[in-house]
Image (cartoon, rainbow, N blue to C red):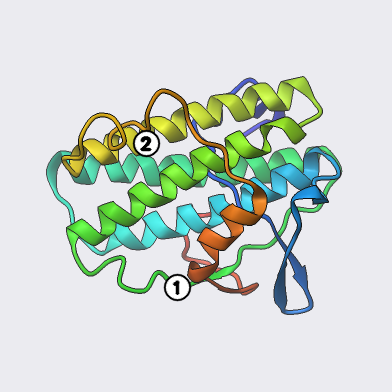
Amino acid sequence: MRRRDFVKGAATVIPGSVALQMLGTKWAFAQSADFGNDIDVLNYALTLEYLEAEFYRQGNEAGLLDGQEAEYLQQVGADESAHVDGITQTINQLGGMPVEAPGVDFGGAFDSRATYLETAFTFENLGVSAYLGAAGFIKQPAILQAAAGIFGVEARHAAVIGNLLGKPAENGVYMGVTETPLSKDEVLAAAQPFLTGAAGMGDDAAVTR
């Protein structure tokens, strides 16, 4: 995917956002004031995109869904992988260094259809709040526009999954009159239980770098 395609919003979705900086072989949580430039924000988004893309790769391979549900979640996973590719290429085009994929452990998320969908619902809403919380730190209007486009698709992902779970309309399929932004620290705290370190996800992962 070309950077100009990403900037125009052609990178379908960019879900959520988690910023971790690697110190040796460990990840150190950054503070909210650490968005020094747009590359910092993009790397923040990239880490959560890694997390989501690997989550859907494992979840879809588990064979917990069928029919329309399986079709929807396969597409959501493809969107997340496309986001990883688009953000990575954009960071490279801007002269930055993309962060590496963290190790992950999703615990019992794939024990059943319900646990898979509930965890997916959590991740998608986390991504929505993360993008909204980071939007004010983006300096380049074109990147802000692309991030807003990704934010919107993330919200649609969450709504589709909420509907599959039979959640109520308000505060279920959608989250009320407005979305709620989360700070970087809040997003990191929510993502921390699923991260095991700076190890990559393996050559067979759906994410390409």
Name the residue nearer the viewer: 133 or 165.
Answer: 133
For the point 63% across and 20% down, the residue is: 8
- For label 1, the SS is loop
Give yes or no for contact between labels 2 and 1 (Cβ–Cβ under 8 Å).
Answer: no
> In the picture provided, is 168 more to the left or to the right than 79?
left
Mark 2–mark 1 Cα distance, whole angstroms, equals: 22 Å
Q: Position of residue 144 (x, y in %)?
A: 69, 26
Using the rendered view, name the quadrant where residue 134 is placed: top right
Of the numbered discs in the image, which one, if any, rests on residue 157?
2
For the point 51% across and 35% down, the residue is: 180
Depicted 70 relative to depicted 185: above or below: above
Depicted 164 relative to depicted 53: above or below: above
Q: Type of residue at label 2?
A: His
Specify the farthest residue to the bottom. Answer: 25
Depicted 69 relative to depicted 3: above or below: below
- For label 2, the SS is helix
Name the residue nearer the viewer: 33 or 64.
Answer: 33
For the point 37% across and 36% down, the residue is: 157
For the point 59% across and 70% down, the residue is: 200
Q: Quadrant of the N terminus?
A: top right
Depicted 172 relative to depicted 101: above or below: above
Q: Position of residue 193 (x, y in %)?
A: 49, 70
Q: Type of residue at label 1?
A: Asp
Q: Is residue 41 visible?
A: yes
Q: Position of residue 32 (x, y in %)?
A: 74, 50
Of the numbered discs in the image, which one, if any, rests on residue 166?
none
Crowd rating for badge 2 (residues with CA inside 10 Å; few <14, some 14–19, many 20+): many
Q: Position of residue 140 (x, y in %)?
A: 80, 25
> In the picture provided, is 172 more to the left or to the right than 166?
right
Q: Quadrant of the C terminus?
A: bottom right
Q: Would you name the residue on which mark 1 appears?
A: 105
